[in-house]
Image (cartoon, rainbow, N blue to C red):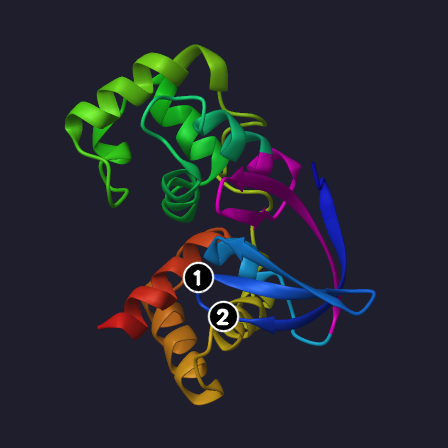
Amino acid sequence: MIAFVSGRVAAAGPDGAVIDVHGVGLSVQCTPTTLAGLRVGEQAKVPTSLVVREDSLTLFGFADDDERGVFELLQTASGVGPRLALAMLAVHTPNALRRAMATEDLTALTQVPGIGKKGAQRIVLELKDRLGGPIGDGAADVRAPARAEPWREQVQMGLINLGWSAKDADAAVSAVAADLDGAETPPVAALLRSALKKLSK
């Protein structure tokens, strides 16, 4: 198993990044949250999970070890492969998934493309006791809350890394900031998702 890759971020796109590890470009499939933390041209250390199939070797990258652990646990449920597990983490943070399992929140799970009500029921049945409850104080669903203003640069760079122009990224960040209008700033992952929704309209 490849536990992590460390090197220069050579490229980043909507679905993943290429990490230059001593001259070898490793393609890593990532969630938008993970990609938001990567900067092209800069060094990065990305926790990874290698999925081996008969016809492919696919490396999946994560923001932290917790996200990777949840990704691997999700796949122990019948019908959940790596792509669906990654989609679940693209929509929900690890703690949000733990909370959904613990409270049997089927509505939250069906927000993930590819999961219907029956599938959500099966996933909850199989994973409720394996994932455990939310980690931390439960005040936030992601790794670290964004501070008052630094989130703007993080979200903007995340959008640029995903292929949007600086102008479009700036406009999306401004639109998200306008929606906040003095309200408590959500975590960066939630802000990035909001910005992506603005751009997709």
**Residue 49 in picture, x, y percent from top left:** 61, 40
- The N terminus: image quadrant: top right
Which residue is tagged 1?
192
Q: Is residue 91 left or right of residue 61?
A: left
Which of the two residues, 150 or 129, is positioned nearer the viewer here?
A: 129
In what element is the residue under mark 1? Answer: helix
Q: Residue furthest right?
A: 22
As rendered, which of 20 and 54 lies closer to the eye? 54
* In-image side of 67 versus 90 (left or right): right
Residue 96 on image: x %, y %:
42, 34
Q: Secondary structure at mark 2?
A: loop
Let me know if residue 20 appears in the view.
yes
Q: How many marks?
A: 2
**How many C-alpha atoms fall within 10 Å of the one at disc 2: few (<14), some, or many (≥20)?**
some
Q: Residue at x 50, y 35 (%)?
A: 71
Q: Position of residue 193 (x, y in %)?
A: 38, 58
Dominant SS of magenta comes to: strand
Residue to which mark 2 is pinned: 13
Q: Which residues are magenta?
A: 42-68
Q: Residue 130: x, y in percent? A: 48, 14
The foreground one among 83 and 69 is: 83
